[in-house]
Image: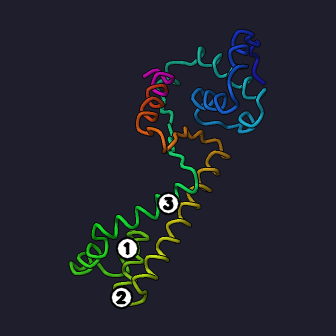
Amino acid sequence: MHDVAEDKQLRDELATKSDGELARMLCELVPLQHNTSDLTDRQRTIRAIEIARHQQHEWTQEQTNSLVPLVIGIRWERAQLRHRITDRLQQRLTAGLIEEVQRLHATGVTWERLDYYGLEYRFVGKFLRGELSRNDMVQKLNAAIHDFAKRQETWFRRMERHGVCIQWVEGQGDPIMESMAIIKRHLKAVGV
């Protein structure tokens, strides 16, 4: 239990914020959330912000100089993400992915080693060995990349459930500029 008095002025200011804005504010103040329930209840989020703001004023120099991780993720609407994945695969194939894998193998990289280079190399290697037709290779590789993207989303959700605050930026906007703004706010918050 934290012995921090209620801050009426802060609470009035926070009352106008959306739940998402409150969660982002708390994540900026306390990047490694140990209590994720503070992010699921509006009143708890407001109280946690209140406590975090109070504690910021009490930080020692040692705490200020410690490393505070910053995790930024790019969020895409699912249908658009699927479209982007498929387009990217077609671009890679057009840009010479098959020829790249052929050259690597010709220079001595074994098929087994190519499997460890990633999905694209694994499936193209199967195609070049005659285990898959070109059409099957493209279809199976596309499906495998989509499955991998789903696993990444699950991984991110698990990170958040375990208290890692991910600063999400929208892929459709300007994710680089949004990320730079988040980094600047983060550096300011940790006193750099």
Front residue (pair 57, 71): 71
Q: Position of residue 75 (x, y in %)?
A: 54, 46
Q: Residue at x 71, y 39 (%)?
A: 36
Front residue (pair 27, 16): 16
- The quarter of the picture where the C terminus appears is top left
Q: Quadrant of residue 135?
A: bottom left
Position of residue 9 relative to residue 45, above or below, is above
Mark 3 neighbour class, 10 Å CA radius: few under 14, some 14 to 19, many 20 or more: few
Secondary structure of the residue carrying tag 3 is helix
Q: Position of residue 136 (x, y in %)?
A: 46, 82
Q: Residue at x 34, y 66 (%)?
A: 92
Secondary structure of the residue carrying tag 2 is loop
Identify the residue under disc 3: 83
Q: Are marks 1 and 2 in contact (CB under 8 Å)?
A: no
Mark 2 neighbour class, 10 Å CA radius: few under 14, some 14 to 19, many 20 or more: few
Q: Amino acid at mark 2?
A: Arg
Find out whether residue 120 is within the magenta segment: no
Identify the residue under disc 1: 121
Using the numbered discs, state the Cα–Cα distance from disc 1 to disc 3 in whole angstroms: 21 Å
Q: Residue at x 72, y 28 (%)?
A: 45
Q: Amino acid at mark 3?
A: His
Q: Residue at x 53, y 54 (%)?
A: 80
Compared across the picture, whether 23 is left or right of 118 comes to right
Identify the residue under disc 2: 129
Which range of residues does the magenta coloring cover?
A: 186-192
- The quarter of the picture where the N terminus appears is top right
Q: Position of residue 125 (x, y in %)?
A: 36, 80
Secondary structure of the residue carrying tag 1 is helix
Labelled disc at residue 97 = none
Using the numbered discs, state the Cα–Cα distance from disc 1 to disc 2 in whole angstroms: 12 Å
| Marked residue nearer the N-terminal end (3 or 2) | 3
